[in-house]
Image: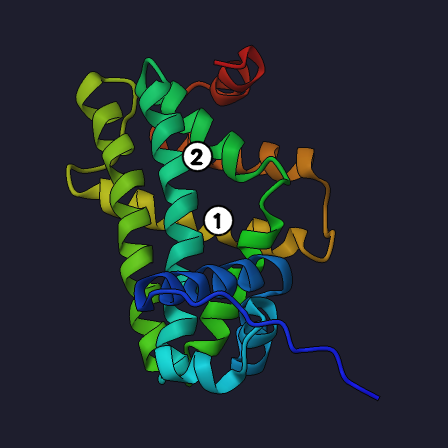
């Protein structure tokens, strides 16, 4: 009995194949978490042998780190767009909080949480995490400094903007991590964070709620 001929896969250039592998790894990280980015899983998603993935990505630690960067840098780009569209620093801050706490980014939160844990044993990933956290702090610090310059925000000293940005990111990360196990509801998380930030920046109580409610 004759067997049917095996279907040949289309040949791709090295650049196309590398991009395909990188895209598959990023999609895996978003769909199943950063820990799912393994040689076999990436190969299965692309539809090639693991050896081919290893040929293009011989260092899986580097591929995991690149997947992390692809996911979180895309989110930061969305945040930058939301901030840029706002008319004032207070509106920028409200847009940032609204976007990060709207409950639609659990997949990205999982990537962050796993990256912090996995980075203990993967220095390549740890270095990438530190760089992305620096980028986030810079964006938030710019918003805080703009508010101070315009007189909308008040801080205890001129050097406080970096500390405020660091504390704000820590609170956002903590609240979003807690949300993964559905501890406290979304409205409570937003209210708690708004009150804390208003106190840190000398804003009137409920000032951020008013901006967020207006949809601006």
* Residue under label 1: 171
Task: Name the residue: 36% across, 39% down.
Answer: 77
Q: Residue 53 at x, y = what percent?
A: 45, 79
Residue lying furthest right in this view? 1
> Dividing the picture into quarters, in which one does residue 17 lie?
bottom left
Q: Nearer the viewer, residue 115 or 47?
A: 47
Q: Nearer the viewer, residue 29 or 144?
A: 29
Residue 178 to residue 34: above or below: above
Which of the colour schemes (rainbow, by chain, secondary structure, one colour) is used? rainbow
Task: Name the residue: 53% across, 64% down.
Answer: 113
Q: Residue 87 at x, y = what percent?
A: 33, 13
Badge 2: few (under 14), some or many (20 or more) residues near its Cα, within 10 Å? many
> Dividing the picture into quarters, in which one does residue 75 lie?
top left
Q: Residue 64 at x, y = what percent?
A: 43, 72
Q: Nearer the viewer, residue 200 or 105?
A: 105
Q: Residue 4 at x, y = what percent?
A: 74, 78
* Residue under label 2: 197
- Determine if residue 112 is in view: no
Residue 89 to residue 71: above or below: above
Instruction: State the CA–CA distance, disc 2 to disc 1.
Output: 10 Å
- Determine if residue 39 is in view: yes
Q: Is residue 185 left or right of residue 38?
A: right
* Quadrant the N terminus occupies: bottom right
Answer with mark 2 or mark 1, whichever residue precedes in sequence. Answer: 1
Asked if the residue under mark 1 is in contact with the one under mark 2, i.e. CB atoms within 8 Å, the reply is yes
């Amino acid at each position: 009995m004759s067997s049917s001929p095996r279907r040949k896969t289309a040949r791709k250039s090295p650049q196309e194949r590398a991009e395909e592998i990188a895209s598959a790894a990023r999609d895996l990280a978003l769909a199943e978490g950063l820990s799912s980015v393994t040689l076999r899983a990436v190969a299965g998603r692309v539809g090639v042998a693991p050896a081919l993935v290893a040929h293009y990505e011989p260092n899986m630690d580097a591929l995991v780190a690149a997947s992390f960067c692809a996911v979180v840098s895309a989110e930061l780009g969305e945040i930058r767009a939301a901030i840029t569209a706002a008319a004032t620093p207070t509106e920028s801050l409200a847009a940032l909080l609204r976007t990060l706490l709207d409950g639609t980014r659990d997949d990205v939160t999982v990537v962050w949480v796993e990256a912090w844990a996995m980075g203990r044993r993967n220095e390549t990933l740890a270095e990438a995490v530190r760089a992305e956290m620096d980028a986030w702090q810079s964006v938030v610090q710019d918003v805080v400094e703009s508010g101070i310059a315009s007189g909308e925000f008040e801080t205890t000293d001129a050097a406080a903007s970096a500390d405020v940005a660091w504390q704000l990111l820590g609170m956002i990360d903590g609240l979003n991590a807690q949300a993964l196990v559905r501890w406290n509801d979304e409205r409570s998380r937003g209210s708690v964070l708004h009150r804390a930030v208003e106190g840190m920046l000398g804003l009137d109580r409920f000032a951020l709620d008013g901006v967020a409610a207006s949809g601006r």
